[in-house]
Image (cartoon, rainbow, N blue to C red):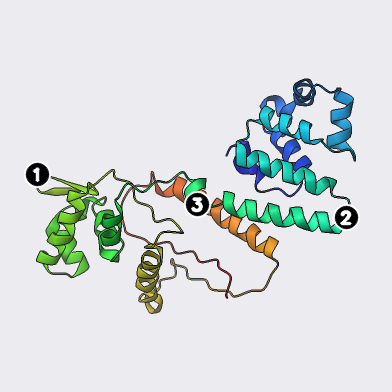
Amino acid sequence: MSAGNKIFHFNDYKKFVIQELKQRPHGGRGQFLRIAQALNIHTTMITHIFRGNLHLSSEQTLGLAEYLGLNELETQFLVDLVMLARAGDQRTKKYFEKRILRMRAKALQLSERFEIKNELSEADQATFYSSWLYTTIRLLTAIPKFQTRAAIAEFLNLGQSKVNKLIEFLISRGLVTEKAGKIFYGNVKTYVAQDSPYVVRHHSNWRLKVVEQYDRLTTEELAFTKPVVMSESDFLKVREELVRFIETFNKISEPSPCEKLYCLNIDWVQIK
């Protein structure tokens, strides 16, 4: 995880910088000297800032962001953390706390976090996300025993003509490929963003499918629901933990051998 990704986990810029430097070669030894040189200040001043009660100036903050290689959004987040630390009254503190919450939420959008792009046209997305069957058939083709039309139709308990129609759409869009009577998972990327007009259909398709199986869950499966009340800042902390889990989930699932079809549903929302 890059320094930029890490910064959104912090409410204290000093803790972020110290933690980041510890991850560098030799445990960060000599980093304060290099930062002091980059900011054109004495190393004693750096020590007083990160080990004492002094704070960075705006100019020093921008210099530090450049030294750490932060992008524009990450730099703005660092600036706001510094301004929060320097706040002299509750009104100013509350102002920057709200800015930080909004910016963290923006930074944690999954499409930006994972740099996912959807390669389907608008019209094709409308079809693809209209039914859970399109995704299911595509995923099944990654499992060797389901790489024929007949095997897919049998697994889904659907007529062969209906399955063929679904497969032809997937083939025509590069979502699957067919060779010598076998169907294989294609390389075209799909992702439905939070602001997509198809996101409700996509989520509801799979949640309804999982709900159908609640009375047949095995001891190896898991379903968890817990309404709670908490602060907005803690709500975002939980969200970040879920995003970290998704990162871990992707690292495990992407190289995993394709043996069975599973579905992960995570809901963490404000009840309005």
Q: Amino acid at mark 1?
A: Ala
Task: Give the residue number, with chain letter if any, for mark 1.
Answer: 180
Which is closer to the viewer, label 2 or label 3? 2
Task: Give the residue number, with chain letter if any, for mark 3.
Answer: 110
Q: Mark 2 or mark 1: name the one nearer the start of the chain.
A: 2
Label number found at residue 89: 2
The one nearer the camera, 129 or 47, is 129
The one nearer the camera, 244 or 4, is 4
Q: Mark 2 or mark 3: name the one nearer the start of the chain.
A: 2
For the point 75% across and 42% down, the residue is: 13
The one nearer the camera, 183 or 193, is 193
Quadrant position of the C terminus in the picture: bottom right
Q: Alpha carbon of mark 2 to alpha carbon of mark 1: how far? A: 72 Å
The residue tagged with tag 3: helix, strand or loop?
helix
For the point 29% across and 61% down, the residue is: 126
Where 207 sits versus 249, above or below? Answer: below
Q: Alpha carbon of mark 3 to alpha carbon of mark 1: how far? A: 38 Å
- In the current view of this chain or complex, which residue is farthest to the bottom? 215
Q: Is residue 156 visible?
A: yes
* Image side of residue 71 versus residue 138, left or right: right
Label 2 environment density (alpha carbons within 10 Å; few <14, some 14–19, many ≥20): few
Q: Mark 3 or mark 1: name the one nearer the start of the chain.
A: 3
Where 70 sits versus 77, above or below? Answer: above
The one nearer the camera, 60 or 241, is 60
The residue tagged with tag 2: helix, strand or loop?
loop
Residue 107, percent from left and from top = 58, 49
